[in-house]
Amino acid sequence: MTLVPQIDGERLLGRLDAFARIGATPAGGVNRQALSVEDRSARRLLAELALKRGFGVFQDGMANLFIRREGVDAALPPLLIGSHLDSQPTGGRFDGALGTLSAFEALEALEDARVETAMPIEVVAWTNEEGSRFAPGVMGSMAFTGADTAAWKSTVASDGASLASELEATIAALPEATPRPIGVPISGYIELHIEQGPSLEKEQIPIGVVTAVQGTRWLEISIQGAAGHAGTTGLAYRKDPMVAAVAAMHSLQATIMPLDTSARLTVGRIAAQPGSINAIPQSVTFTVDLRHPRSERLDDIEAELRRVCAAEAAAQHCTATIRRSFDMPGAAFSPQMIDIVEAAATSLRLPHKQMISGAFHDALFIARVAPAAMIFVPCRDGLSHNEAEYVEPADAITGARVLLQAAIMAASSRDLLQR
Ligand code: GLV
Ligand code: MN
Ligand code: MN
């Protein structure tokens, strides 16, 4: 007798709790930044659970972790389902973990019901999705799709650790995983994630069918002035990069988003050198995270930002240099995979709506090499990248059910098989 695979809600919620304990912060969130000791512990737990169930465990040179359940035809490229296990420094317990653990729950549900799928299915935990410890983000999926990783190897985190050594230590910490090359062929990719915005909750719709992801650019602005004595340097003698930076930030915040409701501009990091209370700084650097669904608007906004920073720097007898550290054009997901996600939600009689993702995700890059799509579930007050991030248990389980159903459909989809 064939059983119908079912998500075990209690098991999924228990796993979410267990992983939230790894890197738990006193305020109820997690600090499990990429390639840290905590990240390694989470990978270890997932690998141990997988080995206990008899699944294959693989790891590539970017420390992307894969849990494999065989299909009827082992020669077919696998369907990938998953997300990431790393977090922001003061991150929530669902961003990334929900998608990864729901994917693992889906694999266990198939195993429990002894359901065979045509394709192998692999759960993936991508390395360094967040990019908060080592920029840029989505490193694992970028490498998987052919990005040149050489430039990243010299990256050093703010805690002094080098990417190269942390990557090596993370890979070495999981000797049970069979090494595999970066970027093996795949049949498709489905990622479940929390919306990280307010629309599903506000509209009381349990499932978002994500059709596209907006573009992101990261810029590092450095304003050079002249260090000087805080007590003796009069206004006429100052070349103060802090004044220029504050004026530039103020001008950008007062114009970009108020004039274009689709634009997002965030200054998330600012540092003054040498950072002494009684010295005019020599330089001030700050980061800008810029997002827009239309890439030509990203070009316009970046041009405006360059103009404003140069003008405000010149007004203080300083100079501005601007480096683009990350350019992630937006992308539309494959109509084929969108249809599968939509059909999965429909077959479970779940209200759903199509939407664009404001956050970037690994799926953005995987979409370049295989049909990909995403499923969103609501989160409380649209809050994310915040320790108070919260998903109703019922919504988490519903997301996992849609992921399981979509994975079953995709793993035997004639279109995907014939690609
Ligand atoms: C992902 O974490 C993002 O910043 O969109
Ligand atoms: Mn995420
Ligand atoms: Mn995130």
Image: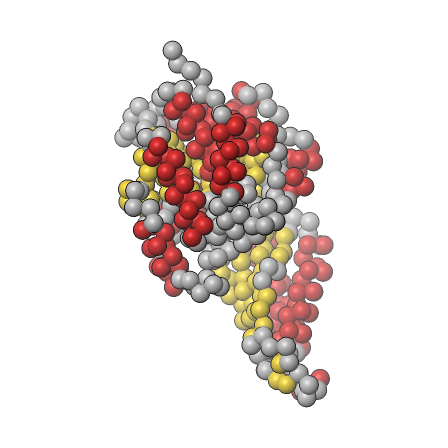
Q: Quadrant of residue 74?
A: top left
Can residue 379 be seen at all in this image of the molecule? yes
Residue 374: where, in percent of width, then height?
51, 36
Residue at the image point whose x is 31% and y is 23% from the top: 72
In the picture shown, does residue 257 fall above or below 361? below
In front of the other: 231 or 404: 231
Q: Is residue 171 left or right of residue 103?
A: left
Q: Is residue 50 left or right of residue 258?
A: left
Residue 305: where, in percent of width, then height?
61, 64
Residue 361: where, in percent of width, then height?
50, 45
Residue 50: where, in percent of width, then height?
37, 34
Q: Is residue 260 left or right of residue 281?
A: right
In the picture shown, does residue 189 fall above or below 294? above
Residue at the image point whose x is 42% and y is 52% from the top: 37
Residue at the image point whose x is 38% and y is 43% from the top: 44
In front of the other: 188 or 349: 349
Can residue 338 be seen at all in this image of the molecule? no
